[in-house]
Image (cartoon, helix red, strand yellow):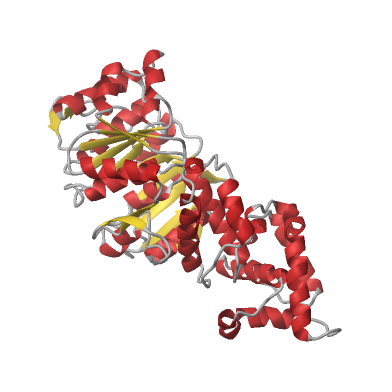
Amino acid sequence: MAEKALLFVAPAQAVTPFFPLFKEAGITVGMVDSLPAALAAIRKSPPAVVFSQAKIGIYTAEALLAETHKEPGFPPVIVFTDRGTAAEAARCLELGARDYWLEPLTWEKIQAVLPREPAVAAAASPAPAAAPAVAPNDVAGKGFAIVGEHPLILRVLALARQVAKSKATVLISGESGTGKEMFARYLHASSDRADGPFVAINCAALPEHLLESELFGHEKGAFTGAIARKLGKFELASGGSILLDEISEMDLGLQAKLLRVLQESEFDRVGGTETVHVDVRVLATTNRRLEDAVAEGRFRQDLYYRLNVIPLKLPALRDRGEDVPRLALFFVEKFRKAYNLPRLAFSADAREWLLAHDWPGNVRELQNLMERAVLLAGAGPIRKAHFLLDGEDWQDEAGPDAEAAGAEAEDDTGEGEAFDAVAAARLFDGEVAAGAGEVVPLEVMERHMIIKSLDRTEGNRTQAAQLLGISVRTLRNKLNEYRKLGIDVP
């Protein structure tokens, strides 16, 4: 079995967002969308884990499980769906699925089930090494960093360091996208439990009865589909830390059982009579004001006080000033390495835009925007136009810059001499041009990135368009233009 190979039975768009992370982790990924293709791929070279969407056209994960559970040595199968039902979950688990997830998929979910071997574990760190210009706050020896120097974030980091080695429960609050799970992992990596497991579960992703089984496990026969004893997340996290993400969405009935775990470090499995004792450090996150939920009767007051032993409130990105360009550079460096591109810098208008933007999606929005900018900037610099790409408006946004770049290129080739765009594209691909600081028209950079994206996705238009942040229609129009110019495209 290939320890660093995964198979996805899913549409391409469900998987492509994770390509840079898979590449960074050295993980080989296969993608299929039918039962025969899935079985052929598994039998030819069994992956470490199979991730299967519940339904794709006439394909169902249940059909795959019905086949795979008959043969020994098949890899574990995780089923995911955006329209889950308790009945479907029970059927999949009964057929041998390792787990049943509700979308969206996240890198955190995926890395939690990857084989625990050094290369994967290192790549699973949420924050890779930054460019020299960025000053991250590192957890020594853990390959983990939080980037930021603004006083607001430094105060939170100082508190996190102070309490990291304790067993105290920490409640991390903040707007969506501010990095709450990142801080939870930082606390774990900085603690005496760093060598133990870190287990995360989203309390909003599952209905009450499934969440209870996920948290506390169940005994054989506890409910329809419970064909064997299953250990819950608390047992799996024993000796380490558990993250209860979106704790505000937990049902009141489960809140009482959670309170018992926090107070007594024990619980009963669903359908069980034996008390299970665990040694777990509990971390929780919320993007809501739990005080309001308590006042409205939706959250237990005693549980709130028990969770809020150490409160960490993360600031919004718009309040962190110069941390915005610092983080932007950090992500640019991450993605330019992932896509094998030269070092990139920000133009003055790009930096001004970064500082002026309101960032409603916080750090998550910034990260996604920087991936887009890296792909569109090519050899750089990154300009404001690369941030504001919006399908068909791309040409309008890039127009003045493209004209200026074209004028410079015309001066280099001589007055009245036609510029050979095809030759420039070839030159732009070459190592000499990449290191010689040649000025290349924006339209040539754009063409280079489009063709490079098609190469990376093996000609898949949908995946290439997603990487570029444009519509498939826009991509097709561009390719038609290139063909009219006599340029070969994948």
- Spot occupied by residue 2 in the image (x, y as percentages of width and height): 33, 65
Tell me the residue at 26%/61% (across/down). Answer: 117
- Vertical position of residue 403 compared to residue 204: above or below: below
In-front residue for pair 259/376: 376
- Vertical position of residue 489 compared to residue 99: above or below: below
Tell me the residue at 54%/58% (across/down). Answer: 371
Tell me the residue at 57%/65% (across/down). Answer: 457
Dividing the image into 4 quarters, which one contains the C terminus? bottom right
Left/right placement of residue 436 relative to residue 336 reads right
Asked whether residue 396 appears in the rendered view, the answer is: yes
In-front residue for pair 171/98: 171
Dividing the image into 4 quarters, which one contains the N terminus? bottom left
Left/right placement of residue 469 relative to residue 193 reads right
- Vertical position of residue 256 compared to residue 436: above or below: above
Asked whether residue 467 appears in the rendered view, the answer is: no
- Spot occupied by residue 277 in the image (x, y as percentages of width and height): 13, 32
Tell me the residue at 19%/49% (across/down). Answer: 196
- Spot occupied by residue 312 in the image (x, y as percentages of width and height): 33, 35
Q: How many marks?
A: 0
Quadrant of residue 27 within the rendered picture = bottom left
Left/right placement of residue 362 relative to residue 50 reads right
- Spot occupied by residue 151 in the image (x, y as percentages of width and height): 38, 44
Left/right placement of residue 386 relative to residue 286 reads right
* Residue placed furthest toward the front: 151
